[in-house]
Image (spheres, rainbow, N blue to C red):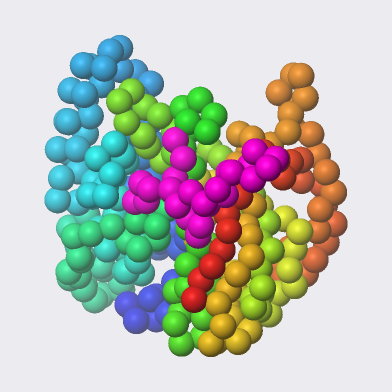
Amino acid sequence: MTYDAAIKQLETMSDEEKLAFAERYGLQSLQQLAVVADEELEQIGAEATSEADFKKKYEAYKEKYAGILITNPYDSSDLSLYVPDGDNVSTYLMNANGMVAIGDAVEIMQLKNEMSKSDKACFGLQKSNFVETMNYNEEWYTNDFSVSNYVKSKKLTFRIEIVGPGDGSTQIHIGAQKHMWYGWKRDDNRELYYTPRLSNMYYQGVVNGHLVPFPQAERYCHKGGKLEIVIGKKNVLSQPVTGTVLVWSDCIAEKDANGNFLYESKQILNGGKLETALVPKCLESSAFHVRVNLP
């Protein structure tokens, strides 16, 4: 397989599929290294005996990955390390030295020393666009929010934006983090849920790397601490996308006295088709309420 052929295949895959693709070819990519580094940070946080001990170990950790992975320049409290230029698909193929070896060919890549757009959207937002408190005491945000300690030691960030000005493609980003000593790190042991109620929206989903029409579901569910997804595009390009999005994590889903999830029936998407399934019960009163207005 050639480098160009590998890139074309990767462009049609999800992030999980991209990682698996590299593993099949025995490649330890930058993206895989970031996963390993995140697991290492988890261990450092768990084994540290004091804040001073953690700080010493953390500084050594950063030095180990200096020049390979980068810190978050938009949030100094973020302890996680990120793949530079992570939107570049070749980061799923290249090693820590910036080289890609496919067959007999070796490519040397140059990366931008900045966070990917998706990482920035999920973990670089520090402000919350608060709108108002409604009569029933629900806070509303406009287009995005970033809220720390919505439950103890948990942080959730959300953004909805137009990413395709030519066709009004609309993308949702959600990032989950947890507190570690004096900062925050990515929290991949989460489930994320959202319900969009949008006007001027033609709902779509990705099949084999291509956007195709999808029906609108009652609930969208994602396992993991980071979600980036194009949900559709504008019906009428000259008009704004308006409406609301309700957002939850598993931390605020309903549970019984023993901490077990309560469930409810909702229409979800499976392979681009609607089906009724049991999902964790999420009350509208406990959701993050986002008012959407995208010109």
Residue 73 seen anywhere in this rendered image of the structure: yes
Instruction: Compare residues 59 and 177 and report the one nearer the observer.
Output: 177
Residue at the spot 22% in from the left edge and 16% down from the top edge:
53
Q: Is 276 situated above or below 59? A: below
Instruction: Compare residues 229 and 44 and report the one nearer the observer.
Output: 229
Residue 38 % position (x, y): 36, 39
Residue 173 % position (x, y): 49, 58
Q: Quadrant of the N terminus?
A: bottom left
**Magenta-tinted stretch:** 124-148
Residue 210 seen anywhere in this rendered image of the structure: no
Instruction: Compare residues 230 and 82 and report the one nearer the observer.
Output: 230
Using the rendered view, name the quadrant where residue 292 is placed. bottom right
Q: Is residue 229 left or right of residue 185?
A: right
Using the rendered view, name the quadrant where residue 217 is placed. bottom right
Residue at the spot 46% in from the left edge and 27% down from the top edge:
153
Residue at the spot 30% in from the left edge and 17% down from the top edge:
48
* Residue that lies at the very extreme toward the front in this rendered image: 135
Instruction: Compare residues 35 and 174 and report the one nearer the observer.
Output: 174
Q: Is residue 26 left or right of residue 63?
A: right
Residue 220 % position (x, y): 68, 56
Is 141 inside the magenta-drawn segment? yes
Q: Is residue 133 left or right of residue 37?
A: right
Is 129 inside the magenta-drawn segment? yes
Residue at the spot 76% in from the left edge and 46% down from the top edge:
279
